[in-house]
Amino acid sequence: MFNRYIDEPRLTCEFRDAAAAFLVELTAELSNYCEVAYDNIWMNWYRDHRDSAGWHADRPANVPPTATVPVVSLGATRRFLIPPSSVGRSTTFIPAGGDALIMRGRCQRDRRHCAPKQQTPAGPRMSLNFGSTAQVNSSSPD
Ligand SMILES: O=C(O)CCC(=O)C(=O)O
């Protein structure tokens, strides 16, 4: 994050080749729905309500002017925040297991997002964040 390595309070894993069993089907469905050729998956495992992801934009999806990044949630329901473009309160999404939250347009370029810690106990949650090499490479610089 922010051009440096930091310890994060969660477990992560990257599938550089989305070739594992049900992930192939899910990747194909999302590619079809979003009209983007997804070919990699960044996975997060939030062990409980104390694990979290701080404010950030996804790399390298934040490089092109626009990008479409689906996040599929599995397991416990947790909050997902996106701040407004200017001032005001963040929009709070509450994706449950099986939900897909899709960040589109300039969301990655202009905004941050986070999955905060919470006080209310929660069980484990996994998030699958889909990436596209083509999407990043085919964007014209602005
Ligand atoms: O777990 C989530 O809902 C989002 C995770 C995320 O944005 C990331 O890993 O870059």
Image (cartoon, helix red, strand yellow):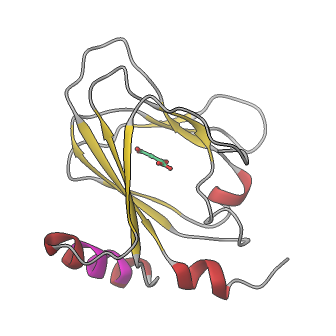
Which quadrant does the C terminus fall into? bottom right
Q: Is residue 7 left or right of residue 78?
A: right
Which quadrant does the N terminus fall into? top right
Position of 66 relative to 51 (above/below) = below
Which residue sits at x=14%, y=74%? 21
Residue 76, position as x, y percentages in the image: 22, 35
Residue 80, position as x, y percentages in the image: 45, 38
Which residue sits at x=77%, y=32%? 87
Which quadrant of the structure image shows residue 65?
Answer: bottom right
Residue 5, position as x, y percentages in the image: 63, 42
Which residue sits at x=25%, y=42%? 96
Position of 83 relative to 73 (above/below) = above
Frontmost residue, 5 versus 2: 5
Query: Is residue 123 on the magenta stretch?
Result: no
Residue farthest to the right, as pictured: 142
**Count of numbered labels shown in the rendering:** 0
Which residue sits at x=46%, y=82%? 36
Residue farthest to the left, as pictured: 21
Which quadrant of the structure image shows residue 61?
Answer: bottom right
Which quadrant of the structure image shows residue 35?
Answer: bottom left
Residue 66, position as x, y percentages in the image: 67, 71
Frontmost residue, 111 versus 84: 111
Q: Main secondary structure of the magenta part?
A: helix
Position of 140 relative to 76 (above/below) = below
Q: Which residues are magenta?
A: 26-31
